[in-house]
Image (cartoon, rainbow, N blue to C red):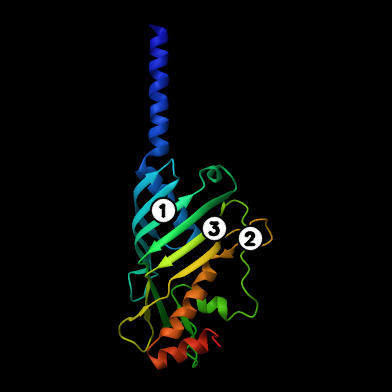
């Protein structure tokens, strides 16, 4: 009888462990918190499907919340995201994502007058801090973190995307259809490490270039060219 109780108790323990590890709600919560911490924006999404054998995740309703005092509610939205990951890397110092496919994403790029500076030049700021990074004399270096885990995405594909641009002189968004894009080795791994990557924040600079060449408003185009050093 004692042996049966031990076996039964052990079986219950194993069941609880597997339920904890593979429960979508728990995984959803952990991923949301980690992603929000990495990109410094509050992030919400729903894991629609997880295939542990093919190591794939389907995410829906991805929303990255905008900063306060900006026009739009979100800085990024995607109805569907397909992720292929390397399960073995989860237990290492570098999380490897094999590929991410963003289907029909929306980028919300906003420029505001920075009233805190209070000078006659009307300094500008934006909701992804691109203007601060681009206008620094020395390119921003992303330091190697001691505690946080690094990640690298081998391939990022962006299909059928659009941008919504809001500037001080415009009352509403200007809608722009973007080109399909593909990036390799995106992440936060330090540049001197074996797995080199371009920082995920730098991807916004490339997207901004695509936005610039398609802006229909000449005043907005000149503002972007002047303040974001586009040649």
Position of 28 relative to 38 (above/below): above
* Residue under the point 41% across and 15% down: 7
Question: Do tag 1 and tag 3 residues touch (Cβ < 8 Å)?
Answer: no
Position of 119 relative to 72 (above/below): below
List the single residue furthest toward the top.
Answer: 1
Q: CA distance from mark 3 to mark 2?
A: 10 Å
Task: Please give the residue where the numbered disc 1 appears in the rendered image.
Answer: 32
Taking depth in this image into account, of 89 and 111 the one nearest to the observer is 89
The answer to whether one can see residue 114 in this image is no
Task: Please give the residue where the numbered disc 2 appears in the rendered image.
Answer: 196
Q: Secondary structure at mark 1?
A: helix
Q: Secondary structure at mark 2?
A: loop
Q: Nearer the viewer, mark 2 or mark 1?
A: 2
Question: Do tag 3 and tag 2 residues touch (Cβ < 8 Å)?
Answer: no
* Residue under the point 35% across and 65% down: 77
**Residue 84 on image: x %, y %:** 46, 51
**Residue 123 on image: x %, y %:** 49, 86
Q: Secondary structure at mark 3?
A: strand
Looking at marks 1 and 3 on the same chain, the residue that comes earlier in the sequence is marked by: 1
Badge 3: residue crowd in 10 Å (few <14, some 14–19, many ≥20): some
List the single residue furthest toward the left.
Answer: 172
Q: CA distance from mark 2 to mark 1?
A: 25 Å
**Residue 226 on image: x %, y %:** 51, 89
The answer to whether one can see residue 207 in this image is yes
Taking depth in this image into account, of 110 and 184 the one nearest to the observer is 184
* Residue 125 appears left or right of 229: left
Q: Nearer the viewer, mark 3 or mark 2?
A: 3
Badge 1: residue crowd in 10 Å (few <14, some 14–19, many ≥20): some
Looking at marks 2 and 1 on the same chain, the residue that comes earlier in the sequence is marked by: 1
- Label of residue 215 in the image: none
């Amino acid at each position: 009888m004692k042996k049966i109780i031990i076996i039964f108790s052990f079986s219950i323990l194993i069941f609880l462990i597997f339920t904890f590890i593979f429960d979508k709600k728990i995984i959803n919560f952990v991923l949301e918190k980690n992603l929000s911490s990495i990109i410094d924006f509050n992030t919400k999404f729903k894991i629609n499907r997880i295939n542990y054998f093919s190591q794939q995740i389907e995410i829906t309703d991805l929303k990255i919340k905008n900063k306060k005092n900006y026009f739009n509610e979100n800085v990024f939205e995607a109805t569907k995201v397909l992720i292929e990951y390397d399960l073995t890397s989860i237990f290492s110092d570098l999380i490897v994502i094999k590929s991410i496919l963003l289907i029909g994403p929306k980028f919300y790029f906003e420029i505001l007058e920075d009233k805190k500076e209070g000078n006659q030049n009307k300094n500008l700021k934006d909701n992804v801090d691109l203007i601060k990074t681009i206008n620094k004399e020395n390119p921003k270096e992303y330091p190697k973190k001691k505690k946080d885990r690094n990640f690298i995405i081998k391939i990022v594909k962006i299909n059928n995307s659009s941008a919504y641009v809001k500037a001080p002189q415009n009352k509403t968004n200007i809608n722009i259809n973007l080109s399909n894009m593909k990036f390799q080795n995106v992440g936060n791994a330090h540049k001197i490490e074996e797995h080199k990557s371009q920082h995920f924040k730098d991807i916004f600079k490339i997207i901004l270039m695509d936005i610039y060449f398609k802006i229909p408003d000449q005043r907005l185009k000149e503002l972007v060219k002047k303040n974001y050093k586009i040649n």
